[in-house]
Image: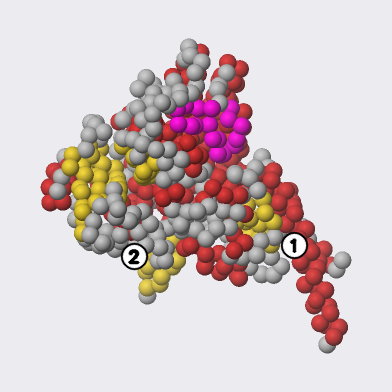
Amino acid sequence: MSLIELSRKKSPWVIHVGTGGCNGCDLEILACLTPRFDASRFGVMSTGNPKHADIMLVVGPVTLKYKEIITNLYNQMPDPKVVIAVGTCASTGGIYQGCYGHCGSLDKVVPVDVYIPGCNVRPEAVIDGLVLGLDILNEKERKILEEKKKSKGAA
Amino acid sequence: MKTTIQFGPQHPVWVEPLRLKLTMDGEIVKDCELEAGFCHRGLEKKFEWDYNKGAYLSERICGICTQHHSTCYCTAVEGTMGLEIPRRAAVIRTIMLELERLHSHLLAIGLTLESIGFENLFMLCFRNREIVLDMFERTTGNRVLHGINIVGGVIRNIGPEMAKELEDFCDIMEKRCLDLKDMILKSYTIRERMQGVGVMSEQLARDLCVVGPVARGSNVPYDIRAVAPYVLYNEIKVKPIVETSGDCWARSVVRVRELFQSIDIIRQCIPLLADAGEDIFAKSKTLPEKEYFTRVEAPRGELFYYAKGKKSKEMDRIKVRTSTYGNGPGFVPLIKGSHLADVGLITITFDPCIGCFDR
Amino acid sequence: MDVKTVTQQEMQDVARRLRAAGTRLITIVGYDSGDTIQVSYFFQPFPEGKAETYRVVVPKHGGNEEVESITPIFPAAYIAENELAEMFGVHVKGVPGRFFLHESINAPLRRKAP
């Protein structure tokens, strides 16, 4: 494990994006970041800027108006990045299936790495998902570094 | 030189998407345009559905005032078929409504403090809020979306042991809220930051028909619990809490003072449980056919449901008019002429709930 | 729930009278009954009194039916009238008529005439 890899490990900054859910999951994410559940134990910090973020937590079914904004946010995030769909409606559409105002689940818009089920999710589940996302993030990081090494060796 | 700033839809101050298009002249906002609909899912169409399932759907309009939404929906549908709910169900609903107001106000106060950079009081508000959520988990089984209201009553009873627990909860909560009140009201920093910012005059509040703490902060004593009492508020008299100055400070102080009002109402409700009969659910013999509307005082203000049945299991039309819908037009005149640094604070003291606003 | 049915012109006078008395507008509700669009206006006298309901019935003729706006009298009606316009595909005079909906969706609550 190289020094850079070690130093970047286990300190993901998350960006929280609400796209049209019912707020229930948004609240539980906030509860995660506050004293009772305290996701900062894992180095998780909330940021408002997509360019600083490693993990995107998305809540709610993607509404038609928000569709292009969420792709925009996704493209602004630096690699490696992980997208977590929080709650049933982000994962499948949930109770809102069949409503005209949204385009269904999140994976139709951006690639999703972790799904957290539950309507609404419990904070424990969010933390569990974050830890899963952390592993995926480290994996992606390693792949990128390996590719860089390879291309350097080839040159 | 004029610049245009897009405030939102993804902004750290708000949890939810809303877009303000600000035209700036230096630091001063000259013009403001509100764009909504980022959360519009089309729920009014979806409500043309089985009326029993509608209660669960109405909870998912907004996760912060779920209990108010489902109570209002159920009361409206019960009205269309002329159904009276048992007294015990009414008492349980009232207790739940007030618990919900507690947690919603703590959230709103916390977010307001966070927007002015007071991070540790925000954390304190959330620590206190967790106790309310624990109480919800003990009584209904869920933390946020409770799912206990159905058309005709409730599905979870509050027994004598739970009533005792609720009483203890009131004592603990009151103590914590007193601490919080001292910390907020006696803080020179918070007062200096919020006083005189975003002043809504009484005339403007009356013209725009704003509701809830926004109206009461501007000396308009409009509270549905007093104006048009529902469930148990005929017996429990509620006096609207009013502040006169109409700025961000007044709106926050109204919320802080309403915490104690809610605790007081819960205390008055608990003894009523003892002699309220055992029934918590009344089965309806008819289907919804008439039209009816109900109003509930949600934490953010007046909540309105219009229901129309068509003599079948499906409803014909449900219209939801939420509190942020009433407060929405109030953003614009307040933001015009304010500093850019105050825009976040002004909007957050309205306690905007975009999930409610757009539906 | 008692409803007073009025014409569009009468509604303007009613709105002006209620505004002068300090009444609050609760909301405007649209309903498509098949061959007509019913627009109900809910008012709450302030500080006390019972809520009042007035209804305007607009016959449907294939889209863009005209409804008089009360936004100049009650500024609070702005969002409600926009919503009425976009949800039912009617034309409310003096408001832009698009607030919540995405451009690709038109009049979702309008029903087909029987």
Q: How many marks?
A: 2
Residue B56 horizontal/vertical position (percent): 51, 39
Could you tell me which quadrant the N terminus of chain B lies in? bottom left
Q: Which mark is residue A137?
A: 1
Within 10 Å of disc 2 (Cα), the crowding (few <14, some 14-19, many 20+) is some
Same chain letter for marks 2 and 1:
no
Q: Position of residue B106 (x, y in %)?
A: 52, 38
Relative vertical location of residue B262 with respect to residue A116 in this rendering, above or below: above
The correct choice, above or below, for B42 with respect to B279 in the image is: below
Of all residues shown, which one is farthest toward the front?
C114
Residue type at mark 2: give it: Lys
Who is closer to the viewer here, B174 or B312?
A: B312
In depth, the one of A116 and A99 nearer the eye is A99
Q: Amino acid at mark 1?
A: Leu
Residue B267 is situated, as x and y percent measured from the top left of the image, at 49, 20
User: At 61% across and 32% down in the image, what residue appears?
Assistant: B141
Bounds of the magenta span? Answer: B139-155
Tell me if residue A57 comes above or below residue B214 in the rendering: below
Tell me what residue is drawn at x 45 percent, y 23 percent.
B282
Tell me the quarter of the picture where residue A47 sits.
Answer: bottom right
Q: Nearer the viewer, residue B268 or B288?
A: B288
- At x 31%, y 35%, the residue is B290
Tell me what residue is drawn at x 34 percent, y 62 percent: C98
Left or right of B50 on screen, residue A3: right
Q: Chain of mark 1?
A: A
**Which is in the foreground here, disc 2 or disc 1?**
1
> Can residue A72 be seen from the camera position used here?
yes
Instruction: State the residue position of label 2.
Output: B30
Characterize the local packing of mark 1: few (<14), some (14-19) or many (20 or more) Cα atoms within 10 angstroms: many
**Image quadrant assignment for residue C107:** bottom left
Q: Is residue B95 visible?
A: no
